[in-house]
Image (tube, grey):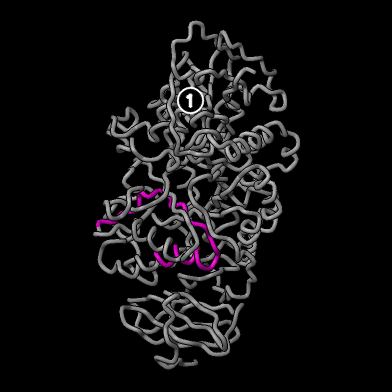
Amino acid sequence: MKGIPAGSYEYDEGLLIGARVLSGGVFFRVWAPGASKVESVVEGRGVYSLSPEGRGYFSGFAPGLTHGDFYRYRLDGTVSLADPASRFQPEGPEGPSEAIDPELFAWTDFDWTGVDLKGQVIYEMHVGTFTKEGTWEAANRFLWELKDLGVTLIELMPVADFPGRFGWGYDGVCLYAPTRLYGRPEGLRAFVNTAHCLGLGVILDVVYNHTGPQGCALSSFSNNYFTDRYENEWGKAVNFDGEGSGPVRDFFVENARYWIREFHMDGLRLDATQMIFDASPTHIVTEITAAVKAAAGERRVLVIAENEPQDAKLIAPAEKGGSGVDALWNDDFHHSAHVAMTGRREAYYVDYNGKPQELLSSIKRGFIYQGQRSIWQGKARGTPSLNVPSMKFVNYLQNHDQVANSAAGLRAHLLTSPGRLRALTALLLLAPSTPLIFQGQEFASNSPFLYFCDLEKGLMEKVRAGRMGFLRQFESIAGMEPDQWLPDPAEPATFQKCKLDESERLANRAAYVLHRDLLEIRRRDAVIREQEGGLDGAVIGPEAFALRFFGGDEDRLLIVNLGADLSLAPCPEPLLAPQSGKFWKIMWSSEHPKYGGTGVRPLDEAELSMPGHSALLLSPFEHT
């Protein structure tokens, strides 16, 4: 056994825990407050004893080690475990950790200055199903297409390593190790580097509310990582405010910094923040948000949060009692749009009518529920957000959760009429909120997105039961036998079905062109792209509404008709009136044949009319 003299290496403040490859060796640091002796067991190299630092930390410099060496930590001479802050697990969470030197990757994104919220179009990606290969290298090949589409920011579903052959990523257990399923860490770095060189930002979905049920070694290093004091629907809650929570907080804050520093991420999406419990004076979400911003230096980064109770104070700055996040996911818009598209009000959709006023309210005010009583939940839902800028709400017609919650994982175009979907797509992509597109949505992918994971047999039985229990809230399937409607999450075939079919990018070209053209308007039109300009709306029919964008002499009028043909005569709505001395002309129509529509009717200046299941964008002109 090789001992490492205490104090032989000065601790690098940029490394909280983990293994850092340095000139001439590797520096190890781990928090194991319950151990009296900690060793690093390096395959083919020997055993290195770490020295106690105090506060439960052990560290030391091991000369002669380098990038690629495999190691485990041995506690008190008996238990050998993967590093809690391992940078890579080539054999999975229960295998050895690999020492990784991030400096070996040659970044070329020197001119990249980061991202602001304004102008972003988010694309949610699950790397394992985005391509047939399911790797970073394969996904890298399609970045140019996303750029051509008009996407500006890629949101990666979680990549922290998890057990098994496939999964969504929300049960990660090695929070610093990009999963080996998609390639090596340098593959992720290359993906981000290519994106930046194309002008695309990349943010990462991270899970700080729980860890997965299999393969997590954190509790073996300390019982303080988790707590039973809070009820968490996915397992034990993380201990952010109890006894011994200081190093636990440090572990997660450093993880947030790590993705920004070592992978050049442009920010984070925080999963299910309502399950991140913390009664400390400074909430951990606030601390993480500040740490992310600081880690980026002069580079601009974003922190976006998911919060099911719709707590708008997360957006408020820390000095005003908030957490300072940049934006919040808005389920209300999705739920109302889903009802409008499908007419179905099962389960949690019972709180929505899908009517024009709901959609207008969501576009103008963000959350629809801002404290009113929810029928489904039987309690008040949401908090006031009337004065929150529209762009701070991330709206979507599809995302990973909501597609999978259709039981069969059906995409929106399979649940509604083509015209309705085109019209609501126009609303999503032209409204001042920040739009999110789920992978494959842009070309009407027929691949479902189902729930899939690969855990040991006993856990999979619980997963199946939990999934069935959740989906039985939908009355249309509640009385059916599970094998009639629930694909087995553990079956490789379930995972394979979810992979996007590359051929559909051409076969369904009309949907792609629709999204591309709308995003070009969003990017180029001075009135639409403003996002912070004046906005108002009015209901003009049983299933129709108008949204007016005020832009001085160049207003825009978006009319969405989700019902039958509409003829407005008389037309007693001032928002439909053109500016003085001007008339409306059609700038864009969802019924253009290149989108699969039936054609564009000329606009009658005397009587405003439009076909059913369509959307029109109008701009002013003067008669010559």
- Give the percent coordinates (x, y) of residue 259: 50, 63
Q: Is residue 174 visible?
A: no
* Residue 212 located left or right of residue 565: left
Answer above or below: position of 330 versus 337.
Answer: below
Q: How many marks?
A: 1
Q: Quadrant of residue 66?
A: bottom right
Q: Nearer the viewer, residue 344 or 198?
A: 198
Label 1: which residue? 547
Q: Residue at x 44, y 14 (%)?
A: 573
Residue range highlighted in magenta: 252-279
Answer above or below: position of 301 versus 386.
Answer: below
* Residue 217 located left or right of residue 415: left
Asked which secondary structure carries label 1, the reply is strand
Quadrant location, the C terminus: top right
Answer above or below: position of 227 versus 167.
Answer: below
Q: Quadrant of residue 362?
A: top left
Q: Residue at x 72, y 39 (%)?
A: 505
Single out the residue that lies furthest toward the top: 570
Q: Is residue 139 visible?
A: yes
- Give the percent coordinates (x, y) of residue 458: 48, 53
The answer to if 355 sits in the magenta stretch is: no
Instruction: Name the amino acid type tagged 1.
Output: Leu
Q: Nearer the viewer, residue 126 or 327?
A: 327
